[in-house]
Amino acid sequence: MDSGIALVGVFSLAVAYVTLRQRSSIQNIPGPPSPSWIFGNMLQLILPGEYGANEFAWLKAFGAVYRLKGCFGTACSFRIILRYSIFSIALSSHMDPLKKTGIDLIFAEKCVMAQQGDTHKRLRAALNPCFTGAAVRNFLPIFEKVAQAMTAKFEESSGSEVDVCPVFSEATLSTISEAALGYPMQDLNKDFVAYNERLLALAVNLSPGQILSDAISVRLPRWILKAAIHLPLTTFHIIRTAKALAKELGGKIIREKIDVARQGSVAETDVFDMLLDLGNPEKKKNALTLDEIVDQTGILLVGGQDTTSNTLAFGLLELARHPTFQDELRVEIHSAIGAASGTPVYDNMPLLNAFIKETLRVYPVGAFEERIATQDTVIPLAYEIQTTTGKIINQIPVSKGQVLHVAIASYQRLESHWGEDAHKFRPSRWLDGTVYQGQAIGPYANLLTFFGGPRACLGYANPEALQCYS
Ligand code: HEM
């Protein structure tokens, strides 16, 4: 991408790891005081009670660029306006060491999320076609079947209080299991389902101790962490078992599919079928090996489950808070179903689409993402800022090795992009021309909820992702 591309977005970048030797210009960027040397601003950022309480106040107080302290006084963070090309190439293609370590421990070695560079590019080239609009439309009967089962569950408990989260979580696991593996959830090994749930519970169990142990573990040599995973601790037991069960499940499914194909019946209905491509004797250029396909099992199931179910839960919460909108949406859905001879055309339902976009804007499941600068680079700012020494700058030099947080939630509350009432849930902003219409920054609706660049969410039909490599 050339450097003439317009400045298109605002990001919050939090440098979570800077060695003491690294001198960085971000030290002079204004920001809130750090209440603790051990935690820096990280407790305020990550555990404020309601997410964003401090982050959105900092956004208001310091504007688009500010500095935060990370754990042990070494880390800084700042909020910044940058070019999409810089964002996608310099930042988004490499994960920060902490996240990479976590992914390596939790998921199989060859899974797409654990890969970097050319291997990542090759895996995405093989996986992307399984998630295009056309491919996903083939899964509609699965979505509808699961939605009907879920609705029946809610209707059964009508009149009493229902915790919707486990119902959504089961529904999304059912959907992905069938769409990705061709395996209905009831056929999944019970242990697999139970450990999958325990693994997801670990991921959301944030505490000061967890934040500290993350900050320490990122500074430890990789071999220590790889050895530590074998210690007899509950957390490590859950991770080890979930990873082994996912691998076992993937292997079993692939053996079954190969056996069925040998008997002359080849299906092309789910993601694994498409990856195996057993009906095609000539292997495609980017075809994955059997081991590589097996290693996608865990990431597909975990990556798609709670992300989707939490989004659904927040959407439902907002429908409960906005009964008039809920009624209007119901009318639109009923009339689309009534008018359609088969499946309604979802793209022709403006209220439904506005509702989905607004839910994804206000409730991005990953409030911020982390990336590492793989080379010394300079982040250009769209607006000049004044440093604490009084200097006016329009770019920030970033050293190789700095870990940066992209503050998705803050970007999606920017008044300049989403209107003066950006903190409010208001689906009509998508219909009345309020929202920013400039160059798209994420793959869907200009949102960063599915991130952007080559590592944007695989689950979002995203053929553009690979273009970001060039
Ligand atoms: C509302 C639903 C979802 C949201 C908000 C979401 C969000 C995201 C985000 C922000 C990332 C980037 C993470 C990072 O690089 O640090 C990501 C990556 C990923 N997502 Fe999703 N996701 C959703 C659903 C799904 C589904 C349904 C699947 C698969 C069935 C999926 C599979 C993946 C995979 C495999 C990656 C890693 C891609 C790579 O590293 O190249 N996601 N997702």
Image (cartoon, rainbow, N blue to C red):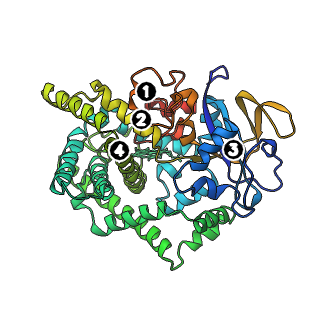
**Alpha-carbon distance for marks 1 and 2?**
8 Å
**Alpha-carbon distance for marks 2 and 4?**
33 Å
Task: Say which residue label 1 marks.
Answer: 429
Q: Secondary structure at mark 4?
A: helix
Q: Are marks 4 and 1 in contact (CB under 8 Å)?
A: no
Task: Say which residue label 4 marks.
Answer: 275
**Alpha-carbon distance for marks 4 and 3?**
31 Å
**Alpha-carbon distance for marks 3 and 2?**
34 Å
- What residue is shown at x 30% (from left), y 55% (from top)? 164
First along the sequence among labels 3 and 1: 3
Q: Position of residue 115 (x, y in %)?
A: 54, 49
Q: Is residue 324 left or right of residue 3?
A: left
Question: Toward the viewer: 73 or 284?
Answer: 73
Observer able to see residue 57: yes
Up the image or down, 121 lies above or below 172; here it is above
Q: Secondary structure at mark 1?
A: helix
Up the image or down, 224 lies above or below 186; here it is below
Q: Are marks 1 and 2 in contact (CB under 8 Å)?
A: yes
First along the sequence among labels 1 and 2: 2
Tell me which amino acid carries mark 2. Glu
Tell me which amino acid carries mark 4. Leu
